[in-house]
Image: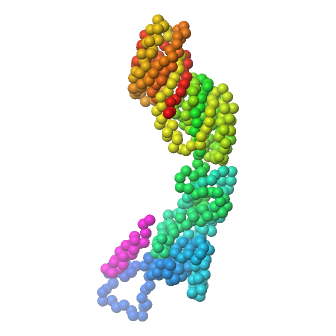
Amino acid sequence: MENDGTKNEIDIEEEDEWQLFASAGYASSELESEEQEIPQDIPEEIWFDGDDFDFEGSTVNWDSPPCPAPLGIAHVIKIGLCDHCINRVSGIRIGTHGPDNGALIRANAYEKDNELESSIMQDYCPLCENLFDDVDNIVDRVFETLSETKFSTMQFGIHLPKELVQEEDRVRSKYGSQGSYPLKGALVEAIHHRISKINKEVEFVKERPDVMVLVDGLTLRVDVDVRPIFLYGRYRKLSREIPQTRWPCRACRGRAGGCESCKGTGLQYPDSVQDLIGEPIRKELGAEDTSFHGMGREDIDVRCLGSGRPFVLEVKRPLVREYQLDHLVRLVNENGSGKVELDDLIWTSKKKVNEVKQSRSEKTYTIRFSVDDLGDEEEAKQAILSLSGKVISQETPKRVSHRRAAKTRKRRVSSVDKVSVEGNEIEMTLRCEAGTYIKELVHSDEGRTSPSVKSVMGSECHVIWLDVEEIHTD
């Protein structure tokens, strides 16, 4: 941190220079004759040069040596430093730490100078403004705020007024021993020590804490941020009537209290994969809310089968951070019976969200559709199989054009197999590159997808249903 003393000293030098060359007397606006006699009986004026601090009668002596010199110790005691601050600036250790060490240093200084104790006039410490006396109060507020929250790791910070930090740094850098401890670090350490006495299982960390605590050193306000926890799993969506995430009501746009159309829920669909999985977990862990991060998504009328779609559930501000995962899986499967199911859950971190979101895994689908004019069954099958290995061109589909950028995408159809015909209906299995629009691959979306099943068969096609059979993450 830059020492403010440099700027003050420059200002003082400029003031001194002005007085050397000015023709007017100090604080005078009238010129005086050079020949005017100065009365000899007027004592020389003593004036404040702007470089001393006066702490209720105890002036900082800038000529005093720094600690741990005995005169330096005596001087910091004289200007009113508390035992905490004496300990951190003195550079002396007498077999103990914290204010106890400062008290011993003070006692030794009093023994060496009998008049030192009587010279102290400070009501508060000029370096910390007695903030160390508030440590117990701060810690009590922290634990009161976290009374219902289970945690094992904590990151702690304190915000101090800029002026206090600057003045503390100036005095400490002048009189403190080399490497003396800054106020903010010492205060946080004292709070850590007090918290550890109350809860010895708390570990203070710099990364990925369970809770983050920030204290305002001016108002002593305590702000606590309970960090989210993350669960990784794969879900199977068994229903063709639920979206992946919450879908706000089209009429009221999900406003608080909802409307008649959504029956007060604020949702277009009362159920979603997010809530069927997230709500039982949220309630069990005492959390405020959840966010759902899936590896892509399927349409509402599309099932997701096989080993399921990978996802990360972000659980916000949970009161409980450790829980038997098999019990959570059971709660989800009971809550989502016939709609959504899980095999297992794994604890993970926020990093997993990016991995899931950025994955470009191929997918295997089964789709059933009808054809207006099937023609010869074998020729129809061969026409469909001819799409295997082809790279198709897909413009943004009309059905998603309101939320997707208008552009043309190139996607590869890795394989097409298991083509079966029943009357005028065809069912087939195909594996495609990530991001392929499967329904449009069949009906062509008015020619926006080319080639398509419609184009190779020469007949209109109408999708009946679509299933995601597998998402190939390996």
The N terminus: image quadrant: bottom left
Residue 195 screen position, x and y as percent: 64, 61
Tell me, yes or no, if residue 17 can be seen here: yes
- Residue toward you, 414 or 191: 414
Residue at the far top in the pictured view: 376
Boundaries of the magenta span: 1-21
* Residue 268 seen in render: no
Q: Nearer the viewer, residue 379 or 302?
A: 379
Q: Nearer the viewer, residue 366 or 125?
A: 366
**Which residue is painted at 60% across and 51% down in the image?**
210
In the displayed structure, does residue 251 sit left or right of residue 385?
A: right
Query: Residue 105 at x, y = what percent?
Result: 58, 79
Counting every numbered tag in the picture gives 0
Q: Left or right: where does residue 298 sit relative to residue 411?
A: right
Q: Which of the colour schemes (rainbow, by chain, secondary structure, one colour) is used?
A: rainbow
Q: Position of residue 461 (x, y in %)?
A: 48, 13
The image shows residue 141 at horizontal and vertical percentages of 65, 58
Q: Residue at x 68, y 35 (%)?
A: 330
Residue 9 colored magenta?
yes
- Residue, far bottom: 41
Residue 459: image quadrant is top left
User: What's the residue at 57%, 70% (across, down)?
Assistant: 129
Q: Is residue 276 above or below residue 190?
A: above
Dominant SS type (magenta): helix
Instruction: Name the side, left or right, on which 454 lies relative to 231.
Output: left
- Give the residue drawn at x 55%, y 34%: 310
- Taking the magenta stretch, the answer to whether it contains residue 107 is no
